[in-house]
């Protein structure tokens, strides 16, 4: 199948796209892929069938999206889509966001024209599909674009966006031995997500599934022991340079909000020599952690009209060793 052949080359670099940073040579490959996949993603009822097949097909434009680390280094204020540097190719009415990695990888595909139409179309829509049918259709779209849902992914969400676009949303997230992955940092949360309209077809695909599984999911540290250790460590978060760049002083750690077992990538935030604040690549490892979350209160005076949102503090304790492997805050 032409679609799968192209995407295999794009994802694992079999010679169709060389294992090198994305260059202009990628343009015709994206173009050919688009021509091979567009018909299968569109419904016969699509309101703009002629707009997806211009006579002289070509890439309209490409835009490079910097990683969070690159944005910080250059003092910019651009909000990244993902933690990878990436390039967005616009082919007729579809956007392709491709991670500028070795090899390049498709991480987002959007039917822009249909998405815009659905946002302005206020006609109520009555759904006809069952939950199982919705999941099956979303899986079919993943197969059609050449990116089947990984076996490690489980259905996390099936919802209908009736108020905005009348679209179904299906989201898969990974787990190992029943333990889910941490999703606190949404820019690198592991997932596969598909949006589609029952009548008009495919709308949106997004995927990040590159975190390695933990070497062990053994739990030797009790919840109580993890909370006790995290309680001592949480105030140290406010001394980190990352916190001081984002938050004002004067907050005090308050109560334990939650403590749950999640698979997370260590960021060593409390260790200045190893701290990772903004990721530019997938992590080398993950750990099963007790993620202990604390609320906080402001201890200083505020102006009468001033409203402060107190941060939450998170401490990550290795569930097997008791080592503090990371921390974070809102």
Image (cartoon, rainbow, N blue to C red):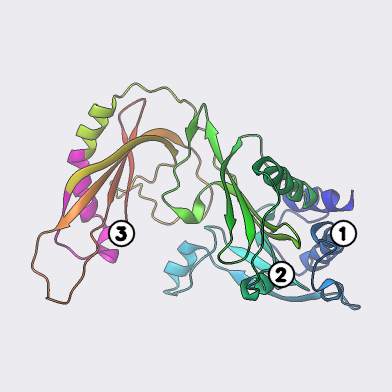
Q: Is residue 294 left or right of residue 183?
A: left
Residue 277 placement (x, y as % from top left): 38, 55
Q: Is residue 59 left or right of residue 278?
A: right
Mark closest to the chain's N terminus, 1 or 2: 1
The residue range painted magenta reads 231-253
Q: CA distance from mark 3 to mark 1?
A: 46 Å
Do the residues under discs 1 and 2 have CB atoms within 8 angstroms?
no
Main SS of residues in magenta = helix
Residue 9 placement (x, y as % from top left): 80, 51
Q: Secondary structure at mark 2?
A: helix
Disc number lying in front (2 or 3): 2
Q: Is residue 221 magenta?
A: no
Q: Is residue 113 left or right of residue 56?
A: left
- Provide the residue designation for mark 3: 242
Q: Is residue 39 left or right of residue 143?
A: right
Local packing at callout 1 (Cα closer than 10 Å; few below 14, some 14-19, many 20+) is some
Mark closest to the chain's N terminus, 2 or 3: 2
- For image coordinates 42% across by 68% down, the residue present is 72
Label of residue 114 in the image: 2
Question: Can residue 15 be seen?
Answer: no
- Provide the residue designation for mark 1: 36
Disc number lying in front (3 or 1): 1
Q: Secondary structure at mark 1?
A: helix
């Amino acid at each position: 199948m032409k679609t799968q052949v192209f995407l295999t080359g794009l994802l694992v670099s079999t010679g169709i796209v060389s294992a090198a940073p994305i260059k202009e040579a990628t343009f015709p490959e994206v173009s050919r892929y688009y021509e091979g996949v567009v018909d299968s993603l569109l419904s016969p009822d699509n309101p703009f069938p002629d707009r997806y097949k211009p006579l002289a097909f070509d890439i309209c434009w490409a835009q490079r999206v910097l990683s969070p680390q690159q944005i910080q280094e250059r003092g910019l204020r651009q909000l990244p889509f993902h933690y990878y540097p990436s390039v967005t190719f616009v082919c007729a009415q579809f956007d392709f966001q491709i991670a500028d990695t070795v090899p390049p990888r498709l991480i987002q595909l959007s039917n822009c024209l249909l998405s815009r139409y659905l946002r302005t179309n206020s006609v109520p829509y009555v759904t006809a599909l069952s939950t199982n049918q919705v999941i099956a259709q979303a899986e079919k779209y993943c197969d059609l674009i050449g990116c089947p849902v990984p076996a490690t992914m489980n259905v996390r969400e099936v919802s209908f966006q009736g108020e905005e676009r009348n679209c179904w949303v299906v989201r898969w997230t990974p787990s190992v031995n029943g333990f889910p992955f941490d999703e606190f940092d949404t820019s690198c949360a592991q997932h596969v997500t598909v949006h589609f309209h029952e009548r008009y077809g495919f709308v949106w695909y997004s995927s990040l599934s590159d975190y390695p599984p933990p070497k062990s999911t053994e739990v030797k540290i009790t919840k109580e022991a993890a909370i006790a250790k995290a309680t001592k460590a949480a105030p140290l978060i406010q001394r980190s340079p990352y916190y001081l760049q984002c938050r004002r002083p004067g907050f005090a750690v308050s109560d334990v909000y939650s403590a749950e077992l999640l698979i997370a990538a260590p960021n060593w935030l409390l260790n200045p020599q190893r701290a990772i604040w903004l990721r530019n690549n997938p992590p080398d490892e993950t750990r099963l952690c007790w993620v202990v979350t604390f609320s906080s209160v402001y201890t200083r005076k505020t102006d009468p009209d001033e409203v402060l949102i107190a941060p939450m503090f998170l401490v990550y304790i290795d569930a097997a060793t008791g080592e503090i492997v990371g921390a974070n805050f809102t």
